[in-house]
Image (cartoon, grey):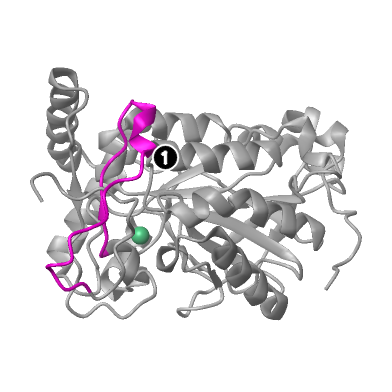
Amino acid sequence: MRLAARHGHLTTAFALALATVLAAAVTFATGPSVRAQDSSAEPAARAEANALSENVRVDACASDPSRLGLSRIVEIDSTDGPQFGANHGATTDFLKDGEVVLTFDDGPLRHNTRNVLKALADHCTKATFFMVGRMAAADPAMVKEVAEAGHSVGSHTWSHKNLRANSFAKGEQDFEMGVSAVNRALGKEATPFFRFPYLGDNRQIGEHLKTRHMSAWWVDVDSKDYLTRDPNVMVRRVMSTLAVKRKGIILMHDIQRSTAGGIRMLLDQLHDKGFKVVHIVPKATVQSLAEYDSIVAKSFSTKAAAAAANPLADRSIVWTAPKHATTDETAAAQTNVRPAKASPQDAAPAKAPAKSKPQPVEILPWQPQPFGY
Ligand SMILES: [Zn+2]
């Protein structure tokens, strides 16, 4: 399959002069406000450029035809709690044939996330990261690094609770602590983009999103990267799904070895097949709530103190598998994941997991076991 010629790239002039280039306004009749901007933008909208440019950084290389780059930047208005993606009853699908949005969940995990960032940078393209609060608290510098590379950073709860399987009160706390943690790690307000852990929907949280002016992001193309260590398998799954669907929001996990090792190959193939990357950026940022900020602040302090006292400590995060999880992300969170450390040795493969405990899914050998396991 070869899609249309790559005429949709941003022009160099546009990329260089983003702050003065305009967004063509596109409003869906039944959906949220979505502004798309590309090289055909009209000067008439020039006055709106400043607001958009605050949240966007595009490099000149984004228009280099030898790289994947970017074809469009779409500004998302999350005010009314819209939901995006073709599945799960989402309200809006703004992607055209051949367009994809790159998304990475569950990080950051320093070594693997860095691999992903490097591949994205070499292809001069942008993605959206849905970070887990506890992971962000364990390595706030890595959260900043992702944002400073020009990617959108959203949240994915504090501890990866399945919001479908928990009470609203518990779910709301995990949701809000996730927002607080990402904002705290960034040192500023994050994008108001959210992804449900395990892709487990919860109607009340969906309503809550509206009050928080945040959007939910579902998945069209699931890499299922947690099921394999082989980058080739991950890439084949994404490309074969895209061969049928031809567009969509792609879900990967920057904590997973198959994605960290395969992302460059995937970007190469997307480029070779003529797919185009759309970068989603927020119209406004999300404010965290003070009561949750204070809870999260204690956790940040504890983790920072522990790291200072013993930089090589084997700190661990264990996500408990929900009893009734039914979605594709289930397996990802049933594995044990250790937060990133400053040491590059963090990437060293861990021992194979003990086999005494039956597990419903494979525990990847690279993933360190919990402290004291
Ligand atoms: Zn997740």
- Residue sitting at 8 percent across and 46 percent down? 372
- Residue sitting at 40 percent across and 50 percent down? 255
Q: Is residue 329 left or right of residue 246?
A: left
Number of residues whose C-alpha sits closer than 10 Å to that of mark 1, classed few (under 14), some (14–19) or many (20 or more): many
Which secondary structure type mostly characterizes the magenta part of the structure?
loop
**Residue 92 placement: quadrant:** bottom right
- Image height of 364 relative to 11, above or below: below
Q: Residue lying furthest top in this view? A: 308
In this orientation, does residue 181 appear? yes
- Residue sitting at 24 percent across and 68 percent down? 163
355 falls in the magenta region = yes
Q: Which residues are magenta?
A: 334-359
Tell me the quarter of the image containing the N terminus.
Answer: bottom right
- Image height of 334 relative to 125, above or below: below
- Image height of 302 relative to 134, above or below: above
**Residue 45 placement: quadrant:** top right
Q: Please state the quadrant of the image where ligand 1 appears.
A: bottom left
Residue 93 place in picture, x, y as percent: 62, 71
Residue 278 place in picture, x, y as percent: 68, 54
Q: Which residue corresponds to mark 1?
A: 190
What's the residue type where badge 1 is placed?
Ala
Q: Please tell me which residue lies in front, 365 or 183.
A: 365
Q: Is residue 244 left or right of residue 139?
A: right
Residue 367 place in picture, x, y as percent: 30, 51
Residue 352 place in picture, x, y as percent: 27, 55
In this orientation, does residue 151 appear? no
- Image height of 198 relative to 104, above or below: below
Give the SS element for disc 1.
loop
